[in-house]
Every structure is written in C-alpha cells, then in structure tokens.
Amino acid sequence: MAIQISAVSYAFLNSYAYGPPQYKEGFLLGKYDESRLVDYILASVPFPLRSSKNPPDIPGQNILGIYRCVPERKPFEFSINDLLSIPEKCKYFCLIEYQDSQISLKFFRVNPRRMPATSPVEYIIFPRLPESDDAEEEKPHPQPKSQIDSPISSRLDSINNRSTQLRQVMTELLINFSK
C-alpha cells in the first residue's frame, strides 16, 4: 500500500504546525484506489477531532485519516487520545512534529477497531538512499566529448533542416497568396 500526497496538502500540513490552535488537528481527504493499491491524499481540513459536530461531507472525497500537530516528542508513542480520535473508517494518522524552525511529517497506517493490539506502521515520506563511503569513488566515467556532442549535433542538424523546409513552404504560400 502506498500513499500519494498532493504538494498543496503537504504544504498546508507543514504550515498548520505554526498556525493557530484550531488548525492543529483535522482530517485528511482523498480517494481510495483499490486496484492500484494507492491512496491519494488531496486535501486537509482543519476540524476539532474530539468534537460532537459531524465531520465535513465533501462530495467525491473520503476521509482517509486525521492529522495532528504537536511539539516534537522523542521517542514518539501513540497516546490513548490519538487512538480514540481516529474515526472508524480512517486508515492514516499524520503526525506533524515541530520545533523552532524544523518540521517533521510522519504517516502511520492505523485501524484501531480491527487491530487494537498491533502497533501502527510508519510510512517514510522522503526515503533517503543508503550512503556509503564508496559513493565518491564510484562516480561515472566521463564520456569522450565527441560521443556526448554527436547526438546533440545530429538533433540540431535535423531541427535546422526542418526549419529550412518550413521557411521554404511558408515563402511559397505567401507568394501564392499575394497573387
């Protein structure tokens, strides 16, 4: 199962961390795609999670999960309030931890109604490539300049030939049109 989050939603979630208290928690809206095993998070809506009000109903969007902004706590552990605030059909919990000028977004797959004893699974948003000491030594070998330039020069020649042909056709059309 994978999550795709829109850039706008990602930006809003980051900005909520430093916003007023009413923006510190809410719902993640999006669409399920069972055939491709991808869920799309398209929007985030600030909403008090422990409220007696009904969640917003937005046509064409499902509530995929919730988000909560908290000051950074290490190590992170789910509180009972976190688990109780997750609606029954939600699949994700997005934790936004902030400290001074640093923000950390963590996604967890949760479903406390079906699996109350298992711990949530964390998704890594921007996975890092493993770093090795040999990375500097394994730089690609530079190609000879003639091999690099040859495809580019042949492409430029092709563009130049097409341009010349187009210029000739346009000139003929203008001459015929002016008669």
Image (spheres, helix red, strand yellow):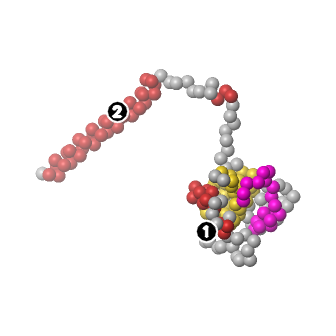
Front-lying residue, 32 or 24: 24
Residue at 70%, 71% (x, y): give it.
Answer: 48
Whether the magenta-drawn stretch holds residue 79 is answered as yes
Instruction: Tell me if residue 72 is in the magenta stretch.
Output: yes
Q: Which residue is mark 1?
A: 60
Residue 59 left/right relative to 65: left
Q: How busy is the neighbourhood of tag 2: few (under 14 within 10 Å), some, or many (20 plus)?
A: few
Residue farthest toward the bottom in the current orientation of the protein:
53
Q: Is residue 125 left or right of residue 112?
A: left
Name which residue lies at 12% across and 51% down.
Answer: 179
Q: Is residue 135 above or below residue 10?
A: above
Residue 117 higher or lower than 151, as above or below: below
What is the residue that sits farthest to the left in this orientation?
179
Which residue is located at x 55 percent, y 24 percent? 141
Considering the numbered disc 2 on the image, is that residue within a helix, a strand or a loop?
helix
> How many residues crowd mark 1 within 10 Å: few (<14), some (14–19), many (20+)?
few
Question: Residue 43: where, in percent of width, then height?
Answer: 61, 63
Residue 36 occupies quadrant: bottom right
Kind of residue at badge 2: Asp
* Amino acid type for the residue under numbered disc 1: Gly
Query: Residue 34 location, x and y as percent?
Result: 68, 58
Judge left or right: residue 127 versus residue 86. left
> In the figure, is residue 178 to the left or right of 135?
left
Q: Which residue is mark 2?
A: 157
Q: Secondary structure at mark 1?
A: loop
Majority SS type along the magenta span: loop
* Residue 50 drawn at (x, y percent): 75, 71
Residue 44, image quadrant: bottom right
Q: Earlier in the sequence, mark 1 or mark 2?
A: 1
Range of magenta residues: 70-87
* Residue located 45% across and 27% down the image: 148
